[in-house]
Image (cartoon, rainbow, N blue to C red):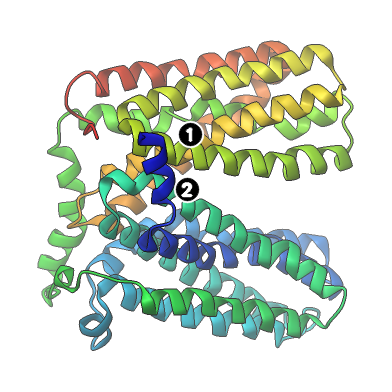
Amino acid sequence: MNFLRALKSYTKPDILVILFLGLSSGLPLALILSTLKAYLVDGGVDLKTIGLFSVASLPYSLKFLWAPIVDSLEIPYLTQKLGKRRSWMIITQFLLMILIASIGAYNAGEDIKIIAILALTVCFVSATQDIVVDAYRIEEIKPEDQGIATGMYVYGYRIGMLISGALALFLSDLIDWSLVYLIIASVMMIGIITTMIAKEDLKRAKNQSHNLVEWFKNSVISPLTDFFHRPKWYIVFPFIIAFKLGDVFAGTLTLPFLLDIGFSKTEIAQIVKTFGLFATLFGVFIGGILVKSWGLNKSLWIAGILQMTSNLAFAYQAELGHYTPSLYAVVFIENFSGGIGDAVFVAYLSSLCNVAFTATQYAILVSFATMSRSILSSSAGVFAELLGWRSFFFLSAMVAIPGLLLLSILTSKFFIKKS
């Protein structure tokens, strides 16, 4: 019965809203990280310059810096009519539609500086949209549905990336790039329409302070001190770093590992990128159901253990070498486990946020987790060279143990609410 009730939750109107908001959030990412580079190649831009465009994605990692402004600032007229979150969403979505269309209006070979500025601006506005959408999801979706909402958000995000990535590249072989960007920009209307029909509690809008010192105290200091006044906060932050560290540690070198043992790029594209994507999405779906049915405590344990043991599958692949049937199984195990972990982890991070500071706190938690894990996983290559692939993947499983130990402390009493 719990499973059926969880399954039915995916059809709720407010959950479907999160699906389309996820699409709106995912659309700009692939457009800048991959599609734009293809546009530049067609325009005759050199590889060195194209490589520098990766810097444009920096706002996604630094969004916590302006999250307090987004969290506290009300937009005249729109906030009273739509609510604080929807007013920010509608503005960022309209801006993204204009900016994306504008990129295609310039010549990649001649207007590289203008395109670079537009790309950076798209990422900044897109990161701002992410801040607001995350805050809306946490505030408007019931706590027991956060796992389901996370799954739908990831689905939408992936669909958005598919449209601005694969579909855009396909269209570029048929029509001019300016039309491609115009079509992709028009897809942002999905987000705009969703925002207009979505519901928001207008009572949450607060009058912002016009005193700079008071604003800084309420919007920057208070969200931080709110964390420090909670039980076991000194365990929470190490846990956020450690929970998916083993997964990221192994994932950093998955591609070099597969190339090294003889798999071709085509095989990797078919098995890891395509088949693996569906396995991930299936894992996200099951992760949402787990949180809904069993609560965060049990779901975190299941996800943590699956993530740890799934790394051992790659150790098995290292023994077999270039053997395609086993790679399908290994990729399914790894991506399915990672998808469950993603859904459960995002639901957990969402549960940590105080609705008074949702946007700021969630942006801090996500930035802290991703940036810290990136630094700690940077040593993976050193260990792989020293130990060899089989032992490296055994080590990556052991790296997950500290996260499970910290989880045992967090779940020992009342810190995580049971649903």
The quadrant in which residue 301 appears is: top left
Residue designated by label 2: 151
Residue 236 locus on image (x, y percent): 28, 31
Residue at coordinates 86% horizontally, 38% vertically from top-left?
Answer: 267
Residue 334 locus on image (x, y percent): 63, 28
Residue 260 locus on image (x, y percent): 84, 26
Query: Three-letter amino acid code at disc 2?
Result: Gly
Decide if residue 191 is on the left or right side of residue 389.
Answer: left
Which quarter of the rendered picture does the C terminus lie within?
top left
Residue with the most extreme front position: 1
The quadrant in which residue 408 appears is: top left
Q: Nearer the viewer, residue 285 or 162?
A: 285
Query: Three-letter amino acid code at disc 1?
Result: Gly
Label 1 residue SS: helix
Crowd tier of the residue under label 1, counting other residues whose Cα lies within 10 Å: few below 14, some 14–19, many 20 or above: many
Mark yes or no: residue 64 visible: yes
Residue designated by label 1: 341
Residue at coordinates 21% horizontally, 34% vertically from top-left?
Answer: 417
The quadrant in which residue 293 appears is: top left
